[in-house]
């Protein structure tokens, strides 16, 4: 009896060890197999090579057409506001502003878009301003297209050429526009002989250089510096 009981106890212990071993092995196998991962399209786009997710190449003519359309829309959109300021400044400087006040002159010009909208939107002064700023935006956009297609983003000469092209377009158009405004709404409107001294042209050009530099190039330089400085 003792022998048979000892044998039964030994078989029972061996069976439990075998069960534990098989159960542990099953768990290890289950743990070793990873469940299937579901990857979202957004994660695939983030980890995919740039060439795989980049937009298809567009033609140069299409990019130029988009640059021109955006420039014209931007120039027309800002021209009413800028024309009011330009006319008010010229009239105030010439002493022809209502009450001699710059702000009253600007308000008077702005009121024409409400009281006489057909004449205001058809005025040559409005389309002069639209042409100047539309040409400025187009020069900048076209420069960006050329630089991007030529992969010249890190070329200092390309940035300098863009600055020169944009400034020359804006300065040339602004000088002609300001001189025309002086004759239309300044001294000539008051009955005096309109003479624009050469110093005024130089100051106009300096103003436009500062405006273009501050509006188009300083933000890009500051953005690059912030990206480099911030972690």
Image: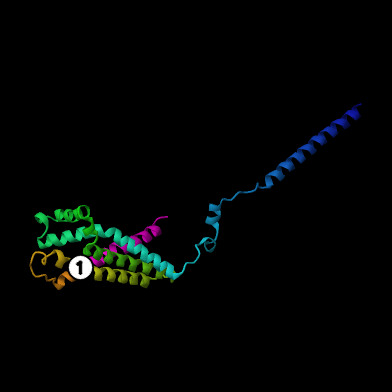
Q: Residue 203, percent across and down?
A: 18, 68
Residue under pointer 1: 204
- Residue 29, quarter of the rendered image: top right
**Does any portion of residue 137 appear in the rendered image?**
yes
Q: Which percent across, then down, holds residue 227? A: 40, 58
Q: Nearer the viewer, residue 127 or 29?
A: 127
Question: Relative to the observer, which residue lies in front, 137 or 83?
Answer: 83
The residues colored magenta run 202-231
Residue at x 16% of width, y 59% of height: 88
Quarter of the image containing the C terminus?
A: bottom left
Closer-to-camera residue (203/231): 203
Q: Tell me which secondary structure the magenta stretch mostly adopts.
A: helix
Location of residue 222 in the rendering, given as x and y in whole percent from the top left corner: 34, 60
Answer few, some or many: residues within 10 Å of disc 1's Cα (few below 14, many 20 plus, some between 14 and 19). Answer: some
Q: Position of residue 118 (x, y in %)?
A: 23, 58
Asked whether residue 154 appears in the rendered view, the answer is no
Q: Residue furthest left?
A: 192
Pick out the residue farthest to the front. 118
């Amino acid at each position: 009896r003792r022998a048979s009981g000892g044998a039964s106890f030994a078989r029972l212990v061996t069976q439990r060890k075998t069960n534990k071993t098989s159960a542990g092995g099953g768990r290890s196998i289950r743990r070793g197999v990873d469940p299937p991962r579901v990857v979202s399209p957004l994660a695939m786009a983030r980890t995919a090579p740039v060439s795989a997710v980049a937009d298809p190449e567009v033609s140069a003519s299409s990019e130029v057409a988009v640059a021109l359309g955006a420039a014209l829309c931007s120039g027309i959109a800002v021209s009413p506001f800028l024309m009011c300021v330009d006319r008010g400044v010229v009239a105030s400087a010439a002493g022809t502003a209502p009450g001699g006040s710059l702000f009253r002159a600007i308000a008077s010009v702005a009121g024409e878009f409400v009281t006489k909208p057909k004449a205001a939107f058809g005025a040559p002064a409005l389309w002069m301003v639209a042409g100047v700023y539309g040409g400025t935006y187009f020069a900048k956009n076209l420069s960006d297209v050329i630089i991007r297609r030529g992969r010249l983003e890190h070329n200092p000469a390309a940035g300098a050429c863009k600055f020169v092209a944009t400034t020359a377009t804006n300065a040339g158009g602004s000088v002609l526009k300001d001189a025309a405004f002086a004759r239309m709404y300044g001294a000539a409107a008051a009955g005096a002989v309109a003479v624009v001294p050469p110093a005024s042209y130089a100051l106009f050009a300096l103003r436009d250089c500062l405006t273009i530099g501050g509006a188009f190039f300083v933000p890009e330089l500051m953005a690059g510096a912030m990206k480099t400085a911030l972690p």
